[in-house]
Image (spheres, coloured by chain):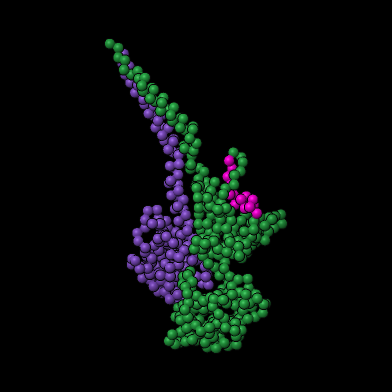
Amino acid sequence: MNEKGQLHTLEGLAAALMITMTVLVISQSTMMVTPQNELAVNVHLEQLSSDALAVIDTADSGSVEHDLTECVSSWNMMEATYPASSLCDLDDELSYLLPGVLYNIELAYFKDQNLNVKKVIINGPPGENSVVVRRFVTITNETVNDAGGGWNLKEDELRVVEVRMTTWKV
Amino acid sequence: MKDESGQIAVDFLLGISLVLIALSFTMQFVPGLFTSGSAGESSLDYTAYRTATILVEDTGWWEHSTGNGTDWETHTSDLMRIGLAVDDEPGTRLTNVPNLISKDKIGQFMLLDESIMVEVLGLYNNVDGSRFAYGYNISITKKGAIINVNNTAITRGTTVPDDQEIAKISRIVLIEHGTTAVLKGDSITSSSSSKATVNITGPFEENITIQLQNLNISGVGPAFVNASLDGAILTQPADMTIYRLEGWDHSPFSGSLNGTDVICFNIDNSLFNMGTEYRIDLEFSNVTFNNTGTSFVNYNNISSPLYEPAYLTVEVWQ
């Protein structure tokens, strides 16, 4: 009678037990917290970025030199070429609110049934763990004329522009 | 011949027993080594996030048998929820402005009883049926320094400990800081072609700010000359400060200007302590005002709250 194989069964059981224990210990220990902390960092960054746009949008002209609608209205329709920005006012106001954070801004809008996405502020390629926040503004011929922009809207035309901001930390 | 392999070796048995004994000893006698860290800490994260969001985006709510509204700052005994966002229509729930912080609500927030704070904001944890209050610190800062509203430093809770895991969330908010009147181009009234004139009725709790934009430059080297209150020249910095508004920044103003500048005159409120009408004249050279006459715009009719950006930070620890 061949009785080989018995020890292997016991070894297998012991190995299975140890693997289960290891997985259990690792999954319960503090090491698992790291990715969650990273998630919290992302949430924090996203919250700050969305606050920055909201604050520039909400502030009226007495509190800030140009609010978000005025900044977007003043755009001269030229895309930015790195490292120059084509919306300097917005760039200044954002960098004041978001120290230590880098961001790119794109404007997205419909014109003649086409979706246009134009880069207006470029600070480099977004890093890992970038977040995107957006805010919509409505511009009219009046706001464009007041701000001296190049949108060239009709007298009664409303245009909704999505301000899309990609932010990341270095 | 009988094959005897397959029997358990004694040294293997000894080895595995030792490992198991050592492992169970370690797990039992070093507290906290293998305890779950994720549950406790992430609930701190949630608490910090929730607290910051409620404070910044919600107006708060009060309610009793005959009434309710968002103006909890005047009904603190029936307080249901704390929130700091501005609301112009306290009877409705749809008119709040997120990120815009009300000065009155901040004032009342600083006076609230500690136990009510912890209870209403949910800054506690239930462990086996008994309640543990978290340590917390809620502050509003600008450029790293805690700001003052009505001469009170806006910070609640205790000092943040150095040696503990802390959940922290910052939000950008706009906080009310006095009032401002914005005058643009031809809407500026003037007593002569070189003097912009504004009537002001006192008294004020905080400094007032007059902003001039789109000035009509009419010569070389346009400049600000002086400001006078009912004929008396105002001095800097005792009576007022003048700055250019650039984005959010207040940059120093030397006197000479150009047409795109936004010039702000921040005038001390103690100059207007009577409930009568005062007159401010702002004299310029090489700037022409076209709206000359004898009736002047009244500051009180066109002023709106002046907001400045700040960070509301919530820190929570066990």
Q: Who's the residue at 44% across and 70% down the image?
A: A71
Residue A151 in the figure: left or right of residue B167: left
Residue A36 within the magenta-colored segment of the rendering: no
Q: Who's the residue at 61% across and 84% down the image?
A: B230
Q: Which residues are magenta?
A: B113-127
Residue B120 within the magenta-colored segment of the rendering: yes
Where is residue B219, by image quadrant? bottom left
Residue B273: horizontal and vertical position, in percent? 65, 76
Q: Between A72 and A27, which is closer to the camera in this rendering?
A: A27
Residue B44: horizontal and vertical position, in percent? 52, 48
Residue B284: horizontal and vertical position, in percent? 50, 85
Quadrant position of the N terminus of chain B in the picture: top left
Residue B189 is at least partly visible in this image? no
Q: Residue furthest top?
A: B1
Q: Who's the residue at 46% across and 37% down the image?
A: B34
Figure check: B122 above or below B144: above
Q: Who's the residue at 64% across and 56% down the image?
A: B112
Figure check: B171 above or below A151: above
Chain B tint as drawn: green
Chain A tint as drawn: purple
